[in-house]
Image: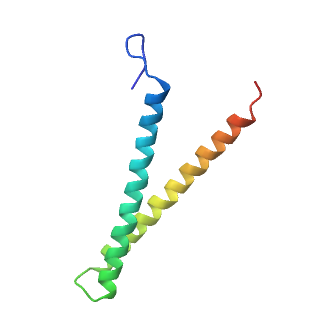
């Protein structure tokens, strides 16, 4: 959303939008992890699950988690840089 003269965005609106975006991303990572665990358990129990599907789900969950951690690290790094700024 681009702010202009007629459409001002308040800091609380930005915070809510950012917060909901983060919650959605974390929920997607969690869902991928749960799906990977379910598929792995099905494979271990001998159910009709293809090995390559289990491996793909596992890698997808792993990549999503790693990406989330890297984004978190960058956000923390940006926050620390802002806090070190002198006014």
* Residue drawn at the location 42% of the way across and 10% of the way down: 5
Q: Residue at x 29, y 82 (%)?
A: 42
Please say which color scheme the image uses. rainbow
Residue 84 in the figure: left or right of residue 16: right
The x and y percentages for residue 66 are 51, 60
Above or below for 84 versus 60: above
Decide if residue 56 is in sight here: no
Toward the bottom, the furthest residue is 46
Identify which residue is drawn at 37% across, 11% down. 6
Residue 29 rendering spot, x and y as whole percentages: 41, 59
Left or right for 30, reference 75: left
In the picture, measured across the screen, residue 76 lies left or right of residue 33, that is right
For the point 38% across and 49% down, the residue is: 24
Q: Residue 1 sits in which quadrant? A: top left
Residue most extreme to the front:
12
Q: In the rendered view, would you say 66 is above or below 18?
A: below
The one of 81 and 23 positioned closer to us in this rendering: 23
Q: Quadrant of residue 86?
A: top right
Residue 3 in sight here: yes
Q: Quadrant of the C terminus?
A: top right
Between 76 and 15, the one lying in front of the other is 15
- Tag count in the figure? 0
Q: In the rendered view, tell whether residue 16 sits above or below residue 67.
A: above
Residue at the far left in the pictured view: 48
The quadrant where residue 82 appears = top right
The percent coordinates of residue 10 (x first, y second) are 46, 23
Q: Residue furthest top?
A: 5
């Amino acid at each position: 959303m681009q702010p202009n003269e007629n459409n001002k965005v308040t800091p609380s609106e930005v915070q809510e939008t950012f917060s909901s975006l983060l919650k959605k991303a974390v929920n997607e990572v969690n869902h991928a992890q749960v799906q990977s665990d379910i598929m792995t358990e099905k494979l271990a129990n001998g159910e009709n699950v293809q090995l390559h599907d289990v491996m793909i789900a596992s890698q997808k969950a792993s990549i999503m988690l790693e990406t989330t951690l890297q984004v978190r690290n960058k956000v923390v790094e940006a926050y620390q840089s802002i806090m070190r700024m002198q006014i």
